Image (spheres, grey):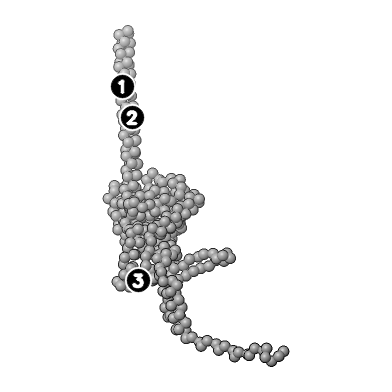
C-alpha cells in the first residue's frame, strides 16, 4: 500500500481525571434536584417509625413497598423519610382525628414527598402532607377482610351457641388490676344483694402487647375452666386508638373459639370491636356488664319468688277446697246420725 494512503496514528485519549467521592455525590445531588424538583404523591407502608420524644423533635419513618417487576420477580423498595417538627405538629393530630389512631408502623399511607439527597446521609424523602382518607379506606378493607376470615371459620357465631348459665356467679375476670373500669365492676357487684366469686386474670388492656397478654390470660382460664360459669373481659374507657388491640384477628379468634361464654365490656360507646362480634354477649362498659349479671340474677330470683307465690296460692286454694269438703262431709255425717237416731 502506498505510504501516502496511510492515515496517521492518533495518540490514545487520556482518561478523564478521577473524581473525588464528594464531587461525584455532589453531581448526583444536583442531577436529582434538577430531575426531581417537584413533590410527588406516593403510597407506601410504614415499616418503622420513631415518634418525637420531646417538643421540637422530628418524626422519622422507614417506608417500604413490596411489588413485582416485569419479570415476575419480587422487589422490595425502601426509603427513609422525615416529617419535620413543625409539620408533624399539624399533620399527626389531624391524621389521628380522621383515622382514629396515631401514625404508627404497619399503616399504609398516601404521602406527598419531596426527594432529598445528601452526600453524607444519602437519599431520603421529606414528608409534606398525608392524606388520612386513604388510610381510613385501607383500614376499612383490612377490617372487612378480618371479618370474612372470622366468618369463614365460624367464629362469629360459635360463642352465641354456648349456653350462659341462668345464674353466672363464678366469674373469671380478665382486666388490669389497676383499671378504673375493673374497680367500677367490682363495686357494682359488691353493692348487689347476691354473692359473686371473682377470680382476676390480669392482662395488659391496651398497646401493642395487649392482644398477646389477653390471649395468655384466656389460656390461664382455659386450664381451670371447670371452676367458672363465664369469662368477663373488661377495661376502662379510652380513645379509639386504645381499642385497636381488640380488632386484632388472633384475639378475636381466641375469644370466638373459647369454651366458656365470654362477656365483653371494653369501654366504648359507638365503635364495635371485632372482639365484641365474636363474644357471647357484648356490652358497652364494665359497669354495664355488672348490671347485666345482677339483673340476670334478679330476674331469676323474681321467677323463683313468683313460682313460690303460685305454689302458696295453689296450696291455699287446695286447703280451702279440702276444708269445705270436710265441712260438707261433717254436716252429712251429723245429719245421717240424727236420722238414724230418730228412726231408732
| Residue located beneath label 2 in the image | 314
Res. 208 image quadrant = bottom left
Res. 122 image quadrant = bottom left
Disc 3 from disc 1: Cα separation: 97 Å
Q: Nearer the viewer, residue 45 or 69?
A: 69
Foreground mark, 2 or 1, reads 2
Q: Residue 320's spot in the image, x, y percent?
A: 30, 25
Q: Which mark is residue 324?
A: 1
Q: Is residue 104 above or below residue 24?
A: above
Disc 2 from disc 1: Cα separation: 15 Å
Circle 2 SS class: helix
Q: Nearer the viewer, residue 39 or 195?
A: 39
Q: Is residue 102 left or right of residue 161?
A: left
Q: Is residue 128 visible?
A: yes
Tell me which label, 2 or 1, sits earlier in the chain. 2
| Residue located beneath label 3 in the image | 84
Whether label 3 touches label 2, CB < 8 Å? no
Circle 1 SS class: helix
Q: Quadrant of the C terminus?
A: top left
Q: Residue at x 33, y 24 (%)?
A: 322
Q: Residue at x 39, y 53 (%)?
A: 273
Disc 3 from disc 2: Cα separation: 82 Å
Foreground mark, 3 or 2, reads 3
In the displayed image of the protein, which residue is found farthest to the bottom? 3
Circle 3 SS class: loop
In the displayed image of the protein, which residue is found farthest to the top? 343
Q: Nearer the viewer, residue 38 or 131?
A: 38
Q: Residue at x 45, y 72 (%)?
A: 35
In the displayed image of the protein, which residue is found farthest to the right? 1
Amino acid at each position: 500500500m502506498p505510504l501516502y494512503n496511510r492515515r496517521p496514528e492518533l495518540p490514545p485519549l487520556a482518561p478523564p481525571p478521577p473524581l473525588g467521592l464528594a464531587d461525584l455525590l455532589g453531581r448526583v445531588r444536583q442531577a436529582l434536584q434538577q430531575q426531581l424538583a417537584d413533590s410527588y404523591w406516593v403510597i407506601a407502608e410504614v415499616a418503622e417509625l420513631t415518634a418525637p420524644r420531646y417538643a421540637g423533635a422530628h418524626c422519622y419513618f422507614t417506608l417500604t413497598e413490596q411489588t413485582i417487576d416485569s419479570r415476575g420477580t419480587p422487589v422490595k423498595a425502601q426509603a427513609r423519610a422525615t416529617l419535620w417538627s413543625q409539620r408533624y405538629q399539624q399533620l399527626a393530630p389531624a391524621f389521628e382525628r380522621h383515622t382514629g389512631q396515631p401514625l404508627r408502623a404497619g399503616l399504609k399511607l398516601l404521602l406527598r414527598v419531596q426527594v432529598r439527597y445528601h452526600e453524607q446521609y444519602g437519599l431520603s424523602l421529606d414528608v409534606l402532607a398525608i392524606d388520612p382518607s386513604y388510610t381510613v379506606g385501607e383500614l376499612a378493607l383490612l377490617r372487612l377482610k378480618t371479618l370474612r376470615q372470622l366468618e369463614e371459620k365460624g367464629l362469629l357465631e360459635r360463642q352465641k351457641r354456648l349456653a350462659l348459665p341462668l345464674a353466672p356467679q363464678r366469674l373469671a375476670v380478665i382486666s388490669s388490676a389497676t383499671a378504673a373500669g375493673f374497680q367500677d365492676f367490682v363495686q357494682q357487684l359488691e353493692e348487689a344483694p347476691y354473692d359473686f366469686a371473682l377470680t382476676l386474670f390480669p392482662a395488659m388492656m391496651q398497646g401493642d402487647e395487649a392482644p398477646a397478654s389477653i390471649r395468655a390470660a384466656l389460656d390461664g382460664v382455659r386450664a381451670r375452666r371447670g371452676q367458672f360459669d363465664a369469662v368477663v373481659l373488661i377495661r376502662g374507657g379510652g380513645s379509639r386508638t386504645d381499642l385497636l388491640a381488640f380488632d386484632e384477628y388472633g384475639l378475636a379468634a381466641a375469644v370466638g373459639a373459647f369454651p366458656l361464654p365470654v362477656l365483653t365490656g371494653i369501654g366504648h360507646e359507638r365503635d364495635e370491636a371485632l372482639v365484641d362480634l365474636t363474644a357471647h354477649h357484648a356490652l358497652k362498659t364494665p359497669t354495664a356488664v355488672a348490671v347485666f349479671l345482677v339483673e340476670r340474677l334478679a330476674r331469676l330470683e323474681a321467677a323463683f319468688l313468683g313460682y313460690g307465690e303460685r305454689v302458696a296460692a295453689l296450696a291455699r286454694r287446695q286447703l280451702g277446697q279440702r276444708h269445705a269438703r270436710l265441712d260438707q262431709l261433717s254436716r252429712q255425717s251429723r245429719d245421717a246420725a240424727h236420722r238414724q237416731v230418730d228412726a231408732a
